[in-house]
Image: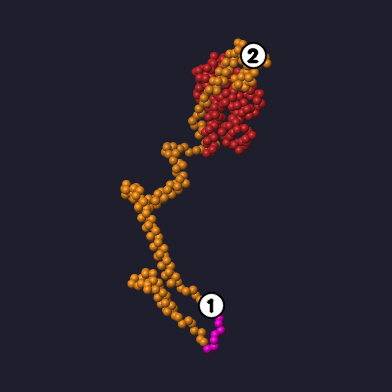
Chain colours: A red, B orange
Amino acid sequence: MAWEDLVRRHTRRIYNICYRFTSNRTEAEDLTQDVFLRIYRTLGSYREAHGGFATWMTSVTRNLLIDHYRRTRRDRMTDSIEDALPQVEEKESKGRRPDQAALSGELSGQVQYALSKISPDLREAVILRDLQGLEYREIQDVLSVPEGTVKSRINRGRLELARLLEQMGLRPE
Amino acid sequence: MNWNCEKVETNLSDYVDRLLAPEERRGFEAHVHGCAVCAPLVARMTSLVASMHALEPLEHPAELERKILNATLGPRKEKLGWRVWFGWMQPVLQPKFAYGALTLIITAAVISQAVGIEWRKPILADLNPVNIYRTADRNAHLIYARSSKFFSDLRVVYEIQSRLRPETPPQPAPEQKQNPGTSNAPDERSPRKMNRARMQDVVTVASVLGVLPGRSSR
C-alpha cells in the first residue's frame, strides 16, 4: 500500500528532525506520530505549488514542532529546577540526556546538547541545513522566510553552536 | 572590497558552503590568514559543519512505524509466526495464480496422456523421444479413426431418422369443385399400409448401408 511505503520511507527522517529539535526521544516519537497523522488527514490539500512532497512534509513537521515549542514553553521554565534534580529526570526520561551524551564524548551528543541551547529559529535552520542536508531554496520554502533570513539564521546558528562547543571545551574533530 | 572581522563573521557560512564569488573568496581568505581572531573561528566553523554533515541519522524506535500505521489506518493484526515465515508465498496464493497453475496441470495431463506417459507407473523408457513420437503418432491415428467412425455412424443415424420422419402433413388444398357423382371418401391408403411402407424403406436403407446382417445391396 502506498501509505505504508510512505510511512516506512519518511519515518526516520521525520523522527530525526523531531529529535534534533526537542532533544527528547519520547517527545520526538509522539511528534513523529502527530506529523504523520496530520499528513494523513491533509494529504488531499497537498499541491505541487508547495514544493516537493518531502519539502511539504518537512513544512508540516516544522509547523508542529513550533506549535509544540509554544505549548511547552511554560514547562521549560522549570528546567532549572529539573536540572537541580537529575535523579528525577533520569527516571522520567527515556534514554540519556543530551548533556550526558555530550560529556561522554560522542559528537552526536555534543551537537545535540549545543542545539538544545540555541533559539528555536536558529535551531531549525541549522537542523534543516546541516543535519538534513536541505538546500537554501528548500529551507526557504519550509520556513516561509526570505533567502537572506535563511542565510542569516544558519550563519548565526552555526556561530552559536561553535561558541557553545568551545565553552564546553569540546571541539569536533 | 575591504574585509574586516565583522564582515568575515557575517559571510562565514557563505564561505563554508562555497557560495562566495571567487573574488570575494580571495578577499575573505586574505583577511583570515592575517587575523588571529578570525582564523580559529573559521577553522572551528569549518570543522563543525563537516562534522555535522558526517553525522549518521539516528535510528527511530522499531515500533514507531507500526504505531503510526495503527493511528492512521486503524489497528492492524499482528502477523502470526507462520505468516511471517510464509509471507513470501502470498503472491503465489492469489486466485489468478491458482487458475494459471490449474490450467498448466490440465495441459500437462492432456499432453502426457497423448504421448503415453503413465504417471502411476512411470518408467524411464516413457521419456525416450522415439517412444514419445510413436505413442503420439499412434494416438493421433486412433483419434482420427475414431472421429471418422463417429461421423460415419452419425450419417447412418441421420439417414434412418430421415426415413422414419413422418411426412409433412399436406397443406390444405384449395377446395375444388367436386364433380357431380363423386363421393367425399378419405384417401384409400390406410395407416397400417403407410407404416408397412416405411418399414420397407428402413430395411432397404439398412441393407444398402450394410447395417443389417444377411442382406446386401444389389
Q: Residues within 10 Å of mark 2 (few under 14, many from 20)?
A: some
State the residue in front, A102 or A85: A102
Mark 2 vs 1, N-terminal side: 2
For image coordinates 39% across by 69% down, the residue present is B209
Q: Residues within 10 Å of mark 1 (few under 14, many from 20)?
A: few
Q: CA distance from mark 2 to mark 1?
A: 128 Å
Q: Chain of mark 1?
A: B
Disc marking residue B5: 2
The x, y position of residue B171, in whole percent, is: 52, 76
The quadrant in which residue A69 appears is top right
Q: Position of residue B16 (x, y in %)?
A: 59, 20
Closer to us: A78 or A54: A54
Task: Farthest residue to the right: give it.
Answer: B1
> What secondary structure is the magenta-colored segment mainly?
loop
User: Of A116 and B49, which appears nearest the observer?
Assistant: B49
Q: Is residue B70 left or right of residue A147?
A: left
A150 sits left or right of B120 in the view: right
A80 over B167 or under it: above or below: above
Chain to which mark 2 belongs: B
Q: Which residue is mark 1?
A: B172
| Identity, as a three-letter code, of the amino acid under mark 1 | Pro
- Residue B218 shows in this picture: yes
The percent coordinates of residue A148 (x first, y second) are: 66, 23
Query: Per the image, is B179 magenta?
Result: yes
Question: Residue B46 lies in what quarter of the image?
Answer: top right
Q: Amino acid at mark 2?
A: Cys
The magenta segment is B174-181
Asked whether residue A155 is in view, the answer is: no
Q: Is residue B206 magenta?
A: no
Element marked by disc 2: helix
